[in-house]
Image (cartoon, helix red, strand yellow):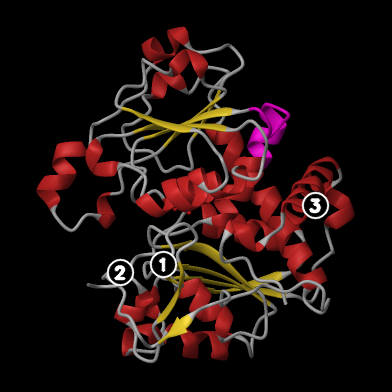
Amino acid sequence: MKHLIDPTDLTREETEEIIDLALDIIDNREKYAEACKGKKLATLFYEPSTRTRLSFTAAMMELGGNVLGFSDAQNSSVSKGETCADTTKVINCFADVIAMRHFEEGAALVSAMNSRIPVINAGDGSHAHPTQTLTDLLTIKREIGRFDNLTIGFCGDLKFGRTVHSLIKALSRYEGVKVVLIAPEQLQLPDYMKKEVCEANGIPFKEVTTLEEVMPELDVLYMTRVQKERFLDEDEFDRVKDCFILDSSKLATAKPEMRILHPLPRVNEITVDVDDDPRAAYFRQVENGKNVRKALILKLLEWKDDPSKSTRLIPEGTIRGKYVCRNPRCISNMEVGVESMFRPDAVHEGEYRCVYCESKPKK
Ligand code: CP
């Protein structure tokens, strides 16, 4: 069975199949109006969301299916201490596909390991957000027309920004992609992303501290919000919260065909005067999110019983029970019954990474 926990759970060909289906859905909405008749999507949202949850809901409704779930875990038996694994087993009795957002990193993986129906990761802590990546790819396809030979600048919170991690992984499969990382020192891209994703795939990247110095070279500027909810220290958040603010004057040196993406919500990192600039694609991006999620639901239901379509949830060489994850937000440190699992580091021989969240073991 196919789940979507990480963008790399889809091959490049499968990803493009979903993007192409989304394009057909945009052109022929009525053709798909009953495509999910009799099917149910469970949206299990343990963390706030506007776009992801409601676009999944709208997507399933427009496909003729039904939606059940919760938008606040406090209204579910999670508040009584039910684990992610048990909740998943219960929901398997009610639905055909699950979309889960969770503050614990690795939660969607644990859910998939306990599921007989496809699980979609709708965001797990700071780790990954693969359906936002599909949204971003569809937006790049429609706005720019290609994935190859792109220079893409990621600006803001690259440390906690799960959408950034997932999109870099997806783009690392294309030729001629260059990544520009625009962030203060405290919010730089995690080490595993630089080494295991960029360096391992030959993706050139550079780190800069001002937008102005790189603006003219960008094909895409991917802005992000500083993720207040991920900071353990409020003073640290206050020091970086206003680190990058994009306004119209800063766009003066940008290419006319450059596009500004943002997963949203924004706080103050893009001023509203930018919204009327034709290069501002972030509200068109939201609409793409609904259509690409329609395509994803259809494909996962189609692939469910295809033995050639399966997701490898536990990587080769995984060691069980030996190490403890150093990440306090990893599900292996937050829920009972989640076995410690570490896979070999793709770059450094003899080192290991947590299967749930990709952190290193505790020393
Ligand atoms: N982009 C995104 O994930 O938005 P929500 O948090 O509103 O779902």
| Residue at 67% from the left image edge and 75% from the top image edge | 118
* Secondary structure under the numbered disc 1 in the rendered image: loop
Which kind of residue does numbered mark 1 sit on?
A: Cys
Q: Is residue 208 above or below residue 117?
A: above
Q: Is residue 275 above or below residue 59?
A: above
> In the shown orientation, is residue 14 left or right of residue 126?
right
Q: Is residue 345 above or below residue 74?
A: above
Does 128 lie within the magenta span? no
Instruction: Name the spot of residue 67 as percent of width and height, x first.
Output: 63, 71
* Residue at numbered disc 2: 329
Which of 173 and 278 lies nearest the eye of the viewer?
173
Instruction: Name the spot of residue 1 as percent of width and height, x first.
Output: 72, 77
* Secondary structure under the numbered disc 3 in the rendered image: helix
Which kind of residue does numbered mark 2 sit on?
A: Arg
Please identify the quarter of the rendering in which residue 214 is found. top left
* Label 2 Cα neighbours within 10 Å, binned few <14 / some 14-19 / many ≥20: some
- Count of numbered badges drawn on the protein: 3
Distance, label 3 to label 1, CA atoms, is 27 Å
Q: Earlier in the sequence, mark 1 or mark 2?
A: 2
> In the shown orientation, is residue 264 left or right of residue 90?
left
Does the residue tagged 2 have its C-beta within 8 Å of any atom of ligand 1?
no
Of circles 3 and 1, the one toward us is 1
Instruction: Name the spot of residue 21 as percent of width and height, x first.
Output: 81, 50
Question: Which image quadrant: the C terminus?
Answer: bottom left
Magenta segment boundaries in residue numbering:
138-149
> In the shown orientation, is residue 175 left or right of residue 25?
left
**Do the residues bearing badges 3 and 1 touch, measured as CB atoms within 8 Å?**
no
Instruction: Name the spot of residue 130 as percent of width and height, x first.
Output: 57, 56
| Residue at 72% from the left image edge and 64% from the top image edge | 297
Q: Earlier in the sequence, mark 2 or mark 3?
A: 3
Does 141 lie within the magenta span? yes
* Residue at numbered disc 3: 17
